[in-house]
């Protein structure tokens, strides 16, 4: 089992972006570092989801840190887009309950059951290769 980090050039965790076309080549440390030469990987997405999901990604050239971040970003955008299509846009808790000061996202009951956080609140803290070409994410917020 190996692990690696996708960090910004400032040394902090890399944030997930709502913009799936963003070029982060100049923003992450060692973007061309090869993670795997395999053409196919699986990434498990579990936070902040009630219903975890595994997505498959392919790349004929294998996966660098930059390409891996793009896959994670693409996966989270699909999750949040699918959830919104299924149940509508989630509100903030303070918008639902005026006596609450929580600005967190309300939990939704769509295909993934997203709770607590918007996509821009998520940070990649660590990636763990559980077995060859199967990765799990440690995501913070």
Image: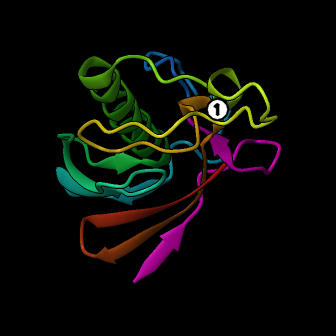
Q: Split into 4 quadrants, where in the image is the N terminus?
A: bottom left
Whether residue 6 is in magenta: the answer is: yes
User: In the depicted view, which residue is nearer to us: 94 or 42?
Assistant: 94
Q: Is residue 92 left or right of residue 53?
A: right
Q: Residue at x 56, y 35 (%)?
A: 16
Q: Is residue 58 left or right of residue 4?
A: left
Asked if residue 101 is positioned above or below residue 131 in the image, the reply reads: above
Residue 112 horizontal/vertical position (percent): 30, 44
* Colour basis: rainbow
Residue 4 horizontal/vertical position (percent): 54, 66
What residue did someone put label 1 on?
93
Asked if residue 10 is positioned above or below residue 43 in the image, the reply reads: above
- Count of numbered labels shown in the rendering: 1
Q: Residue at x 60, y 42 (%)?
A: 122
What's the magenta region? 1-16
Q: Quadrant of residue 98?
A: top right
Q: Residue at x 27, y 48 (%)?
A: 62
Whether residue 99 is in magenta: the answer is: no
Asked if residue 8 is positioned above or below residue 135 in the image, the reply reads: above
């Amino acid at each position: 089992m190996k692990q690696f980090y996708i960090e910004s050039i400032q040394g902090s965790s890399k944030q997930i972006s709502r913009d799936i076309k963003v070029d982060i080549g100049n923003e992450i440390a060692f973007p061309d570092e090869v993670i795997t030469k395999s053409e196919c990987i699986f990434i498990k997405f579990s936070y902040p989801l009630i219903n975890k999901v595994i997505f498959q990604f392919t790349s004929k050239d294998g996966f660098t840190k930059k390409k891996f971040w793009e896959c994670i970003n693409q996966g989270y955008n699909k999750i949040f887009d699918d959830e919104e299509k299924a149940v509508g846009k989630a509100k903030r808790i303070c918008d639902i309950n005026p006596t609450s000061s929580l600005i967190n996202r309300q939990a939704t009951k769509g295909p993934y059951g997203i709770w607590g956080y918007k996509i821009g609140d998520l940070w990649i803290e660590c990636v763990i290769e559980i077995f060859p070409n199967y990765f799990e994410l440690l995501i913070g917020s």
